[in-house]
Image (cartoon, rainbow, N blue to C red):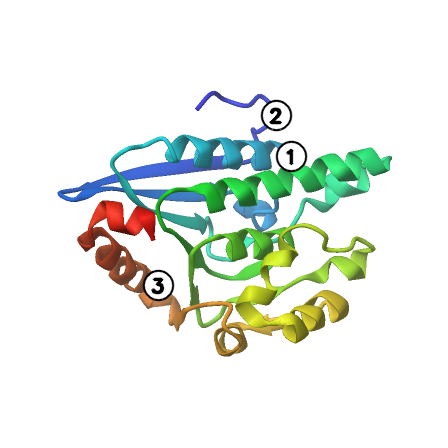
Amino acid sequence: MAANPLAAAHKIDIAWERRPAGVVAHVTYDYARRLNVLGPPALLDLTEAFQSLAREADLRCVVLAGAGGRAFIGGADINHMAGMRSSEDGRRFITMVHQLCQAIRDCPVPVICRLEGYTLGAGLEVAAACDLRIATDTAHFGMPEVKVGVPSVVEAALLPRLIGWGRTSRLLLTAETIDAAKAEAWGFVEEVVPATEIGAAVERVVAAIVEATPLAVRGQ
């Protein structure tokens, strides 16, 4: 992937794990010093990464994580949003969030989201775009946009199929942050484990996927 001259603040690491039955890609978004917030350069780079992954014939599974342990993705970059001067600026940013979520959804193999620390705003939308979500018991989730004057208008539309309309409205309208136990009870995450066990929990799901028939998994 070509280097983005505007992307010095963040990194996207892709580790290729080659197994007898195929390849598992571990994608880590690293802007840990700012809770892995998303600005335009990161959105473009992550979208390009998933579009590239989709072309890998031997790919069996993708694990998406945020670096540092304090956050998966802490939301949109407020510094960038504060600099927007027009509705067109907002529309461009919203489109980039949508394009990333669509690239994840278009990935032809399962995408497992590894959730540690805070998953907020655009980060919650990215997590919702994944196929499976596994969280640590210290993780927290929320959609705080209304507190900063920005409605959630993109992939928040994915939330009702996971947690229902009422709970989606509660998150969007109150900006409430929920803990991992409630996120699991609501159906947003599939499994919650202690932080020391998150790697093993992800591996159990990855192993089950890799053991299945590749074309059947892609077709499913």
Find out whether the residues at labels 3 and 2 contact each other: C-beta distance under 8 Å.
no
Q: In this image, 8 relative to 50: left or right?
A: right
Which residue is under mark 2?
Answer: 6
Q: Circle 3 — which element?
A: helix
Q: Position of residue 13 (x, y in %)?
A: 41, 37
Say which quarter of the image contains residue 95: top right
Find out whether the residues at labels 1 and 2 contact each other: C-beta distance under 8 Å.
yes
Q: Mark 1 or mark 3, which is nearer the start of the sequence?
A: 1
Q: Circle 2 — which element?
A: loop
Q: Position of residue 2 (x, y in %)?
A: 47, 20
Rendered residue at 32%/47% (across/down): 218
Give residue 140's mark: none
The crowding category of the residue bearing disc 1, from other C-alpha atoms within 10 Å (few below 14, some 14 to 19, many at least 20), is some
**Nearest to viewer (mark 1 / mark 2):** 1
Query: Outermost residue toward the right?
Result: 86
Q: Position of residue 85 (x, y in %)?
A: 86, 35
The crowding category of the residue bearing disc 3, from other C-alpha atoms within 10 Å (few below 14, some 14 to 19, many at least 20), is some
Q: Position of residue 194 (x, y in %)?
A: 38, 71
User: Alpha-carbon distance for marks 3 and 2?
Assistant: 32 Å
User: Alpha-carbon distance for marks 3 and 1?
Assistant: 29 Å
Q: Do we see residue 142 in this rendering?
A: yes
Which residue is under mark 3?
Answer: 198
Q: What type is the residue that disc 1 sits on?
A: Pro
User: Alpha-carbon distance for marks 1 and 2?
Assistant: 9 Å
As drawn, 128 above or below 36: below
Which residue is under mark 1?
Answer: 40
As drawn, 89 above or below 206: above
As drawn, 24 above or below 133: above
The crowding category of the residue bearing disc 2, from other C-alpha atoms within 10 Å (few below 14, some 14 to 19, many at least 20), is few
